[in-house]
Image (cartoon, grey):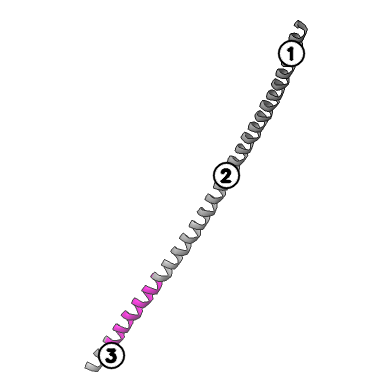
Amino acid sequence: ELQDCLTKQLETTDTLMSIKDEALTSVNDLTNLVHEKEAALVEMSELLKMNNQANEKILTHANNKYTRQLAEKEMCIQNLFRIIQRQQFGESEHFRKLIKEKEK
């Protein structure tokens, strides 16, 4: 009977050791998975940072381009306005001269 008890304890011990080994393997697998995920997060963070920098450069370039275009168009409008003013003023002067000549 003592032999049976020792045999059962030995079987139980073997089973517990097997369970422990499986648990340690699972813990190691999970630890490796966590390290892989951490590395992926670091890589993703770097990619997002690079993407944000690229987007910022694109937006800055577009903003500068459209600001220049707007300034150019504003300058054209101002020049057209001046031309119109000169034409109107010139025509007024022309009509004044004609009126003065007719009055003489």
Q: Nearer the viewer, residue 64 or 38?
A: 38
**Viewer-side residue, 78 vs 62:** 62
Query: SS for tag 2?
Result: helix
Q: Is residue 77 above or below residue 50?
A: below
- Judge left or right: residue 15 versus residue 56: right
Mark in front: 2 vs 3: 2
Regarding mark 1 in the picture, which secondary structure is present there?
A: helix
Residue type for callout 2: Leu
Amino acid tagged 1: Lys
Please state which of residues 28 and 15 is positioned toward the viewer in this rendering: 15
Q: Secondary structure at mark 3?
A: helix
Distance from Cα at disc 1 to Cα at disc 3:
131 Å
Residue name at image x 36 percent, y 77 percent: 84
Looking at the image, is mark 1 or mark 2 nearer the viewer? 1
Q: Dot 1 surroundings within 10 Å: few (below 14), some, or many (20 or more)? A: few
Q: Identify residue for label 2.
A: 48
Label 2 – label 3 distance at C-alpha: 73 Å
Q: Viewed as shown, does residue 66 lie left or right of 20?
A: left
* Magenta highlight on residue 93: yes
Q: Nearer the viewer, mark 1 or mark 3?
A: 1
- Mark 1 lies on residue: 8
For this orientation, the residue located farthest to the top is 2
**Quarter the N terminus occupies:** top right
Kindly identify which numbered label has been placed on residue 103: none
Q: Which residue is mark 3?
A: 98
